[in-house]
Image (cartoon, rainbow, N blue to C red):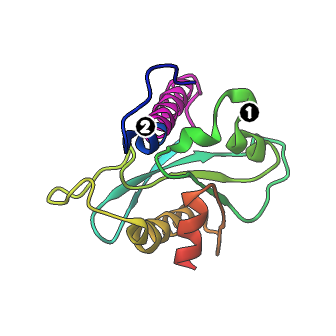
Amino acid sequence: CFKGPPLPGRWRAVYPATVTLLCTSLAWIALCASLAWWGRRVPPADERHDAPTDDGWVLTLHRFRPPPGVTLQPIPVVLGHGILMTRFCWELSPATSVPRWLARRGHDVWVAEYRGTPSSVPPPTGDRWGYDARDHAWSDVPAILDTVRAVTGAPTASWVGHSMGGLVAMLHA
């Protein structure tokens, strides 16, 4: 689609890759901005809980309880979001909300937000961005599961992960 004069030497190979990288980056930023905008339109969860980690972070859990009159499922469900996302990846709108859909079917649903999300609180002396997938798997997942089990009294919980949410569960296992 480039109609200008021929590019000199090495730029013939670099130009298409640069344009592709730039367009992909802009598309990713637009997707994240769209999710953030849609997230503001979703009603809040029934409850919000703090999950302290062993290294000082305080994570946020959003609980969706089953409505009255629904047969309750015995094992709570934790939904883990993907990389560069928050709980809103599970709730694009009230009509397409995965946690609300599961709650209407009797599941006690907990949507986790890991370290690095806007609702998480870093340790007072810690680096807000100095972590990796191992920290999510070895500190965040245990804190999330411990909090869910402590509040619900359930012996275990089911984890459903999207993208990085599945990866950290596998690393934790």
- Kind of element beneath mark 2: helix
Vertical order, 156 against 58 (above or below): below
Residue 39: x percent and y percent? Answer: 54, 29
Residue where numbered disc 1 is placed: 96
Q: Residue at x 44, y 28 (%)?
A: 6
> Is residue 91 found left or right of 40 in the rendered image?
right
Q: Which residues are magenta?
A: 18-46
Relative to 12, residue 134 above or below: below
Q: Earlier in the sequence, mark 1 or mark 2?
A: 2
Q: Residue at x 79, y 59 (%)?
A: 73
Crowding around mark 2 (Cα neighbors within 10 Å: few <14, some 14 to 19, many 20+) is few
Q: Residue furthest top?
A: 3
Q: Is residue 87 inside the magenta stretch? A: no
Q: Residues within 10 Å of mark 1 (few under 14, many from 20)?
A: few
Outermost residue, left side: 125
* Magenta stretch: includes residue 30: yes
Identify the amino acid type marked 1. Answer: Thr
Q: Position of residue 159 (x, y in %)?
A: 65, 64
Look at mark 2 in the image and give the residue it sits on. Answer: 15
| Amino acid type, mark 2 | Tyr
Look at 55% across and 32% down and name the residue there. Answer: 44
The label on residue 24 is: none
Residue 149 visible (yes or no): no
Q: Quadrant of the C terminus?
A: bottom right
Residue 69 location, quadrant: top right
